[in-house]
Amino acid sequence: MPSVLVLDPLSDEGLALLEAAEGVTYEVRTGLSGDALKKSLNEFDGAICRSGVKITPESLEGNTRLKAIVRAGVGTDNIDKKAATRAGIVVMNTPAGNTVSTAEQTIALLLAMSRNVAPAYQSLIEGRWDRKKFMGTQVSGKTLGIVGLGRIGMAVATRAKALEMNLIGYDPFMSAEHADKFGIELVENVADMLPRLDYLTVHTPLTDETRGLIGPEQVAALKPGARLVNCARGGIYDEAALVEGLKSGKLGGVALDVFPEEPCTENPLFGMDGVVCTPHLGASTEEAQNQVAVEAVELLTAYLMTGA
Ligand code: NAD
Ligand code: MLT
């Protein structure tokens, strides 16, 4: 009978589906690392994780049992895929379940940054009624640059269009005709869009190509006062360049949901004027978590039950 190990918290709907899956047993063991993780991974046929657990080459060393790992979510960057492949373990993800929630978080941060929502509320908590300090910016009529026009980038585009923003996009795999159907002006590289943007948002994976995509040179090329959002992966923006950009007044704001190292509770950006950050909450809605959990359970049980 195939057995499943749940390595990160999974929604109740996902767990109920595992419970109901005939011929499958499961156990939840969260917070594992080191030897405990390695030992556990060798006791089950399949594993489901989110981004908390780090499945390293060491944790898979000598594994003779595990057949598949499913990531409930998009990014598989916490799983060493080369090591998994070497051990004959299939790695799968559930890419579509959290698209809408992450696009909504992007728009939430864009608006919160533009209207100083977080510092204004903080000032109320501290007993101040300060209407002058928190003058904001309207987003209607402003230009938003979107790098990465995949699932989330396109969901952001349709929502930003509804806010009457002008859209410029860059994605090497998108045609100008397709972008045009969504009201996006496609450019040939990121550099071309920078001087024209009021806002920039990135929705690419973190790769050798996208790491540090926006560094000191790109910040210098931006329009003065530009505001930057990142709900994709930490490291796409060079944080030191963001700090300098804010200090010099070149950047009007920075909104981040993701960080190069997570968890991240100390960061030079935290507390700077114009900054609003959240602890990787893009996919943290009931709807998204249910969807990715259910998809992950369905994928894994189908894979294990067909005897693959
Ligand atoms: P996707 O694969 O649908 O889209 C990614 C797009 O990036 C693709 O269209 C691809 O062509 C494009 N791309 C790749 N390299 C590029 C480059 N160098 N320049 C420009 N475009 C490039 O992925 P998605 O589901 O839209 O997810 C996007 C990102 O968001 C991923 O990094 C994912 O891990 C992250 N994510 C974060 C959260 C969160 O909680 N904050 C939630 C879900 C996804
Ligand atoms: C993802 O890649 O799916 C997101 O970053 C969300 C998450 O990790 O929960």
Image: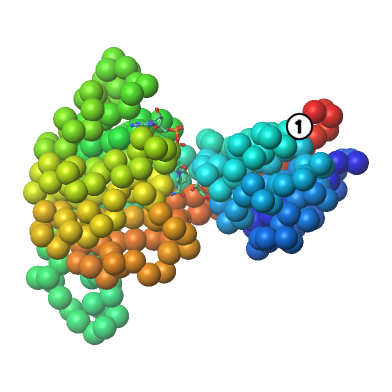
User: Pointer 1: what residue?
Assistant: 303
Quadrant housing the C terminus: top right
Residue visible at 33% across and 23% down in the picture: 172
Q: Nearer the viewer, residue 242 or 168?
A: 242
Left or right of 256 on screen, residue 281: right
The colour scheme used to paint the residues is rainbow
How many numbered marks are there? 1
Percent position (x, y) of residue 78? Answer: 56, 48
Quadrant housing the N terminus: top right
Residue visible at 59% across and 45% down in the picture: 79
- Vertical position of residue 201 compared to residue 36: above or below: above
Left or right of 293 on screen, residue 308: right
Q: Is residue 21 visible?
A: no
Q: Quadrant of residue 277?
A: bottom left
Residue visible at 35% across and 30% down in the picture: 149
- Vertical position of residue 177 compared to residue 86: above or below: above
